[in-house]
Amino acid sequence: MSKIIVMTSGKGGVGKTTSSASFAAGLAQRGHKTVVVDFDVGLRNLDLLMGCERRVVFDFINVINGDARLKQALIKDKRVDNLWILPTSQTRDKDALKKDGVEKVIEQLKDDGFDYIVCDSPAGIEKGALMALYFADEAIVVTNPEISSVRDSDRILGVLSSRSRRAELDMEPVKEHLLLTRYDTNRVQLGEMLTVDDVLEILAVPLLGVIPESESVLRASNLGAPVILDETSPPGQAYSDAVGRFLGEQVAHRFITAEKRGFFHRLLRRTA
Amino acid sequence: MRLFNLFRKEPPSANAARERLKIVLAHERAGLKGPDYLPKLHKDLIRVVRKYITVGDDKVSVRVQDSGTINRLEVNIELPTTSLMHH
């Protein structure tokens, strides 16, 4: 039985694609046949973060329009077994994504035996974002500890509970998870950043993971390798923990409290 | 004085963020509930009231109260103190 996951946020630039890439890679690493689908039509970027931009021949929209078969558009990851990427199109046609077309492709992915279909949503609450979340069984809401991001997450949670397929058909609601990204424990400790508890209290969604702010994330995107593959990096470990939790494992949260730093280090930070 | 300023810490801002968020979300969540025609009704009401009285957007509130058996449409218009004398 396939499970459809949407990676969503409302706000742009909070780490949806970074999280989709790592989450999908993490699920595949644990033996689940996984595909990550880029819904950001016209602003294709998942291919870059997955390092397969030069292997894109056909895309999601070609398959929807019947110009290519699904097999031709799916790109098999070279590093991780069980992992496929379905890139999107760079077309500027806003109506490229239609409900029946998306449904057709999702049904084919299910028939192909994918355990997980990870839908990487574009920002906003327009067509692309609505299509990405419409078929979801579970939603991972990516949020930064910053007011505009939290507000937009609240808004997208409202959309999930009213405009998803599950909501429209009066089925069991989409299962929601919170993924707090770009968390800076030092700034939290100084009272400069919302805490995990602040965000949890406001959004009231179960916490899937906290991804620490780290230079490894930019490095990973520079190299085109999901940061979860950088196994010694804090964000890599945090994503791996989050995938474990998603699969029902009991994993304690890390990277939530500041590491102990010497007086000299603190002094440097203070004046920096 | 200069030396003192060097060691002065900016007041922490996370508390302000948290409080502002709580207020704005309480507002927005209330607005999202209720029937779809509410925002439009709200705008129309403001337009009509303004024909007679000068009121700010925030002085007119419209909401549906669900009390189990009946739904009540509640319209609240806060008049400026001077308007009572003129009209």
Image: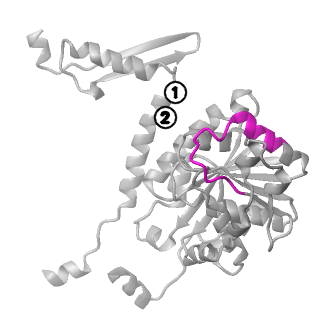
Task: Compute the Cα span from label 2 to label 1.
Answer: 7 Å
Badge 2 vs badge 1, beta-carbon distance below 8 Å: yes
Question: Of the residues shown, which amino acid type is indicated by label 2?
Answer: Arg
The reply, left or right, for residue A95 in relation to residue A194 is right
Q: Residue furthest bottom?
A: A264
The residue lying toward the viewer, choosing from A173 and B39, is B39
Residue at the image position 82 percent from the left and 68 percent from the top: A29
Task: Give me the disc on residue A75.
Answer: none
A4 relative to A134, above or below: below
Magenta run includes residue A95: yes
Residue receiving disc 1: B33
Image position of A180 with respect to A111: above or below? below
Q: Position of residue A132 (x, y in %)?
A: 66, 44
Residue drawn at x 56%, y 74% is A218
For the C terminus of chain B, the quadrant is top left
> What is the span of residues highlighted in magenta in the rendered image?
A87-107
Q: Nearer the viewer, residue A230 or A196?
A: A230
Report x, y in % for residue A192. 40, 66
Chain for numbered disc 2: B
